[in-house]
Image: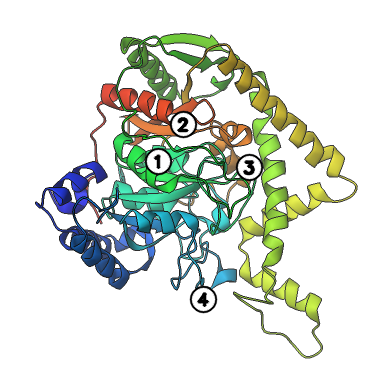
Amino acid sequence: MNANELTIAEARDALAGGELSAVDLTMACLTAIDAGTPLNAFVHATPEIALDQARAADARRGADAGALNGIPLGIKDLFCTKGVASQAASNILKGFKPEYESTVTSKLFEAGAVMLGKLNMDEFAMGSSNETSCYGDAVNPWKVDDRRLTPGGSSGGSAAAVAADLCLGATGTDTGGSIRQPAAFTGIVGIKPTYGRVSRWGIVAFASSLDQAGPMTKSVRDAAILLGAMAGHDPKDSTSADIPVPDFEAALTGDIRGKKIGIPREYRMDGMPAEIEALWARGREMLADAGAEIVDISLPHTKYALPAYYVIAPAEASSNLARYDGVRYGHRARLGQGDGIVDMYEKTRAEGFGKEVQRRVMIGTYVLSAGFYDAYYNRARKVRALIKRDFDEAFAAGVDAILTPATPSSAFGLGEMAEADPVAMYLNDVFTVTVNLAGLPGISVPVGVDAKGLPLGLQLIGRPWDEAGLLNHAHVLERAAGFVEKPRKWW
């Protein structure tokens, strides 16, 4: 096994035991990144920074070393990294190199992590297939025919990089499923923590009441280790919760006897593929075999989640993206004689924003406009409150976690859906957006493959602030499923 194929937990033990140096581990990943160019996962490689950090990790090995000392990670292009291009995969931020470090990357570096570079994503995190990026499509390392498959989105580069062993783990962000859907499409683990568990400071904003950063890893144990380093209160983020961060790894006892797992009847969608239905049934059996009690529950407002999400998220995006005007940083359009400031705004945004971002900004501006604010935005906020209440009632009735499919299908071909029908693309988020609207933690675990041989995931949804319990349920599911398949190397 090459060093880059190790899990974070395995590499940590090998580094601590002196069987491996951080420099060797980092070099193995950098070599894999060079070979992985066809995947288009890494868009800004930082080998010099990585090797400097690896040498520093080797120098401080021992009792004082952090939880991630010497562990090479990929960072989604949405996280601001000091002196390193942070474009959110948008032409409007071309050339932008922040003068500051996001709280998440600061915490990872404090824990001793090594940054291999920045990862591809959908522009401003708007997309479910990584096809809206200014860097071009990221490609799923899984391949079953002559098509190039999507790794999912918006954290598609993160998912592809982890699945292809280009890094040991990666950061992602999740606004409506952007960690969990790509994790399911690539056969890895991805957790979206409770809203407020991880600081959003220094992460380029899409929809501020929904965005949450989280880890994308090769195993549930790795997710627990990485989340422990990312989480914590941050006074620079007013939505960050001042709640102690438990030892998530220590919570992985593998014992869920007597726990109640809810199965929401509303997640049985019309036309759901038989393979997804069968996988869900298998998941229920695996958790029941581990001693959990399976109960049917109702989340009656689920059917309104997608419409509510696609009002609230674009509304917040139109507000957040108003700052990209060509005045202070990023791209500025060339102006003709006689052009005024309004012309500069219009030309800059027309050139800098891609089609999907323009579409969502226009939807958002429309639903916030004077005549439609109550009809759309306010109504969507009320529906959001009802969706959250559904979950609150289920948890109040004693449910410990909720099991659902992660995605309505396995990975589809690049180009098959994006241009044809943007609304059909939005349906990829059908099982995931409720979790963001309610601010809950959710995790995708790879459980099997479909008839074509492509990975499929199941989603577990946890109580607010109970990532520890959620990770333990996921650990049990992962162990029972025994998913060990890896993509065959074609790149």
Q: Few, some or many C-alpha atoms within 10 Å of disc 3 (few <14, some 14-19, many ≥20)?
A: few
**Pointer 4 local density, CA inside 10 Å: few below 14, some 14–19, many at least 20:** some
Position of the C terminus, as image quadrant, is bottom left
Query: Please, what secondary structure does the residue beneath circle 4 have?
Result: loop
For the point 31% across and 63% down, which residue is it? 37
Label whose residue precedes the other's in the sequence (1 or 4): 4
Could you tell me the amino acid type at mark 1? Answer: Ala
The residue type indicated by label 3 comes to Val
- Sequence order check: which comes first, mark 3 or mark 2? 2
- State how far apart marks 1 and 2 are (Cα): 9 Å
Among the two numbered marks 4 and 2 on one chain, the one whose residue lies closer to the N terminus:
4
Whole-number angstrom distance, CA of label 3 to CA of label 4: 32 Å
**Mark 1 surroundings within 10 Å by alpha-carbon count, few (fewer than 14), some (14 through 19), many (20 or more):** many
From this viewpoint, is residue 188 visible? no
Residue marked by disc 3: 423
Q: Nearer the viewer, mark 4 or mark 2?
A: 4
**Residue receiving disc 1:** 183
**Can you identify the residue that label 4 sits on?**
95
Between residue 469 and residue 247, name the one nearer to us.
247
- Locate residue 74 relative to residue 16 in the image: left or right: right
Distance, label 4 to label 2, CA atoms, is: 36 Å
Residue 373 horizontal/vertical position (percent): 84, 44
Marks 3, 1: nearer the viewer: 1
Q: Which residue is mark 2?
A: 406
Q: Is residue 188 left or right of residue 431?
A: left
Question: Residue 432 at what x, y percent from top left?
Answer: 54, 34
Of the residues tagged 3 and 4, which is closer to the observer? 4
Which kind of residue does numbered mark 2 sit on?
Answer: Ala
In the rendered image, the vertical position of residue 310 relative to residue 42, given as above or below:
above
Decide which of tag 3 and tag 1 comes sooner along the chain.
1
Residue 301 locus on image (x, y percent) = 68, 23
